[in-house]
Image (spheres, rainbow, N blue to C red):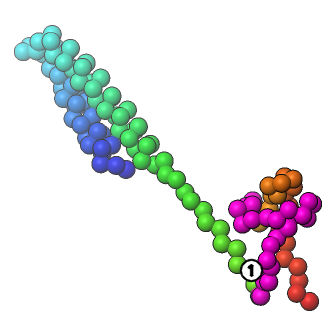
Amino acid sequence: MKAGSVISYILAAIFIIFSFLLLLGSGGQGGSPTWIVYGIIGLILGFVLIFAGVRLSAAAKQTVQNVTLNVDLPGNVKMDTIKCESCGAPLAAEDMKLVNGAVTVQCHSCGTSYQITEEPKW
């Protein structure tokens, strides 16, 4: 929670409490009808500050999450280029994506996508 939203909530509480006291005091013997106007304005300001605090805290929660995928190939991999199974076009590392926990490749030439599987070594 940001400091701005906390300050907004504290000011809103102060405005609402004093506005409520002004509204209660306006009906007494020493009260004035203008206290009703000030009380209503204070209540409106308090609720506007609560709304602003909610907006500030919601903006603070929006964060960007970056996911980094490192593919570690076991053993000695001697491969100059990876080629598409359909058209034979060379594939780059940018063509690999992680989809549902599996590494998939989409060819930039023909658009074919397939999952990379590791063949057994024996």
Please tell me whether residue 95 is drawn above or below residue 15 in the rendered image. below
Dot 1: element: loop
Q: Name the side, left or right, on which 82 lies relative to 70.
A: right
Q: Amino acid at mark 1?
A: Leu
Please tell me whether residue 55 is drawn above or below residue 66 in the rendered image. above
Please tell me in which quadrant of the rendered image residue 48 appears.
top left
Q: Name the side, left or right, on which 111 lies relative to 57.
A: right
Q: Can residue 114 be seen from the camera position used here?
A: yes
Disc 1 designates what residue?
Answer: 73
Q: Position of residue 30 (x, y in %)?
A: 6, 15
Total numbered circles: 1
Residue 37 versus residue 29: which sits nearer the camera?
37
Q: Residue furthest left?
A: 30
Please tell me in which quadrant of the rendered image residue 36 appears.
top left
Residue 15 versus residue 5: which sits nearer the camera?
5
Q: Find the magenta span and give its range.
A: 75-99
Q: Position of residue 20 (x, y in %)?
A: 23, 25
Which residue does the image show at 85% across and 72% down from the upper left?
117
Residue 48 versus residue 105: which sits nearer the camera?
105
Which residue does the image show at 15% across and 16% down from the upper left?
35
Please tell me whether residue 70 is drawn above or below residue 112 in the rendered image. below
Residue 52 versus residue 24: which sits nearer the camera?
52
